Amino acid sequence: MEITASMVKELRETSGAGMMDCKKALVECNGDMDKAMDWLREKGIAKSAKKESRIAAEGLANIYVEGNKAVVIEVNSETDFVSKNEEFTSMIDVIGKAILSSDATTVEETLELPCEEGTVRDLIVAKTAKIGEKLSLRRIAVLTKEDSDSFGAYLHMGGKIAVLALLKGANEEVAKDVAMQAAAMRPEYVKKEDVPADVVEREKAVLKEQAMNEGKPADIAEKMVIGRINKFYKEICLTLQPFIKDGDIDVETYVKNNNGEVIDVIRYEVGEGMEKRNDNFAEEVMNQVNGN
């Protein structure tokens, strides 16, 4: 029986298994969809599909640099233990290097990149089945630079935080200092002009209300807002933050003193903004020991 692409696609969507595994299953089962599904389950390949609804908010972020191109990625798992698994870390390396050697700039494009397992999507499905946890490529960022620009890469806590700084001019050491600043101080924006107008207006309204609640008349409150909004900018904008190695200057001044300018900074903290698992770990271990 001829195995069509639509049959492979249907089995892939049903089982969550990789494309090549689905094709092999259909060939082995002469095109019978139900038997092919059973074949995949017997081989332990289809079990990854059952994990799709589970929460994966742990994992690792990493940075890959080659010449004038750099990639930052975050790959999630269900538990922190997996981040120390060689199967998991090697998978991240495959994904990062695949992006470096391609034109992919989005997660969707990355998932379709070719690799030994078929595609990156197939690789993740295969590793999900082998490791036994839901794994997912959450996000990627790609930066390119000129020869005269500088990348600064910094990984904190073994990849729980990954920061890539791009500077015009300067050098790699200065760029890494900027990346370390971002890792430590968690700025929400790179520059003052990056802050959306509605965020600024909302903060000004709050600050004015605070001043008036302190008993200040409206005109005085307006003037107080000007000073307080500048403090707000210094808290949330990387370039305006006091430089952690020299609190007498801000980050922008430090970079300028080294003949540079901050162009962009990518900061990934694993699991930020995601729902976390809240399992009873002792109970989970006992369930596994007892075969439940």
Image: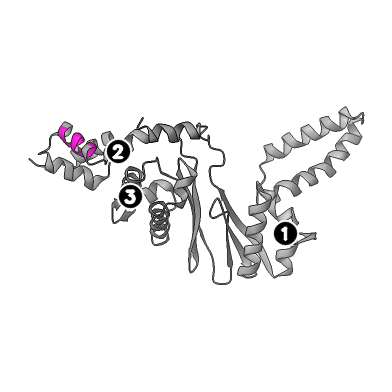
Left or right: 110, with 69 as reference point: left
Alpha carbon distance from label 2 to label 1: 47 Å
Residue 241 percent location from the top left of the image: 74, 53
Mark closer to the chain start, 3 or 2? 2
Residue position marked by numbered label 1 in the rendering: 251
Mark 1 or 3, closer to the camera: 3
Q: What residue sits 20% from the left and 35% below the top?
A: 37
Under mark 2, the amino acid is Gly
Under mark 1, the amino acid is Val
Quadrant that contains the N terminus: top left
Residue position marked by numbered label 3 in the rendering: 123
Alpha carbon distance from label 3 to label 2: 11 Å
Residue position marked by numbered label 2 in the rendering: 16
Q: How crowded is mark 1: few (under 14 residues within 10 Å), some or many (20 or more)?
A: many
Q: What residue sits 46% from the left and 52% below the top?
A: 84
Alpha carbon distance from label 1 to label 3: 41 Å
Q: What residue sits 68% from the left and 40% below the top?
A: 197
Q: What stretch is highlighted in magenta?
A: 35-41
Residue 179 percent location from the top left of the image: 62, 58
Mark 2 or 1, closer to the camera: 2
